[in-house]
Amino acid sequence: MPDDTQVPPDAAVDEQRAVPDGAADPGAAEGGGEPHKLATLQAQLEESFRRARDTSDRLKETHDRLLRTAAEFDNFKKRAVKEKEDVQRFGIERLLKDFLPVMDNLERALDHAEQHDSRQVIEGVRLVQKLFETVLAKHGVVGFSALGKPFDPSLHEALMQQESDEPAGTVVSEMAKGYKLNDRLVRPAAVVVSKPRTPAEPPPAANSEGGGQA
């Protein structure tokens, strides 16, 4: 026999009232979570922007550092090229300084031979001297004379001064020639420089007192 029992209206109302006041309504809970999600997304977005800025700053710093490194490396290459060129041009400078006294002695021997009219000796030594000069010129070494020129401290080394009728400061004697290597001074010319002559002292006056006595 079917149960035709019906719930009285008052009972339905009482059942609704039985729900606790603090219980959350599922629909209300779902709608109230939206602001929280928005705040979370906003925080994540700001964090992403911060990280992007940090990454950009690091990239800029790295780029600047690479530019500085590239500039330093370029300067290093230029210095290396210049040093290599200097070695090629001036690497034999020390050898030349040891070799030049040989040229000096050869020139002195020629001067001595010329004074004694040793023609054959002069001719032989002169040939050797020219051979030396040719070899030196091949390596960029050129001698220069200072005789008769104004004294130049950048090219000449004054060994002494000598009274002369030449203008003061003129090279009147050359003890050794100067030499250059590719326009760089290897050795200055050793010279004697003129100075004005000392005025002659007048002769002492004659003593006439003794001559007037009888």
Image: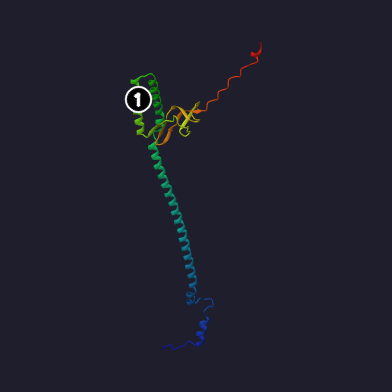
Q: Position of residue 203 (x, y in %)?
A: 58, 20
Q: Nearer the viewer, residue 4 or 196?
A: 196
| Residue 96 vertical placement versus 43 (above, below) | above
In what quadrant of the picture does the C terminus appear?
top right
What residue did someone put label 1 on?
126
Q: Position of residue 210 (x, y in %)?
A: 65, 13
Q: Secondary structure at mark 1?
A: helix
Give the amino acid type for the residue marked by disc 1 in the picture: Arg
The residue sitting at 48% across, 67% down in the picture is: 42
The residue sitting at 38% across, 33% down in the picture is: 141
96 vs 19, left or right, is left
Q: How many labels sit on residues?
A: 1
Q: Position of residue 177 (x, y in %)?
A: 42, 29
What is the quadrant of residue 183 in the picture?
Answer: top left
The residue sitting at 43% across, 47% down in the picture is: 72
Q: Position of residue 206 (x, y in %)?
A: 61, 17
Q: Nearer the viewer, residue 175 or 33?
A: 175
The residue sitting at 47% across, 57% down in the picture is: 57
What is the quadrant of residue 94 in the picture?
Answer: top left
Considering every residue shown, the one lying at the far top of the view is 214
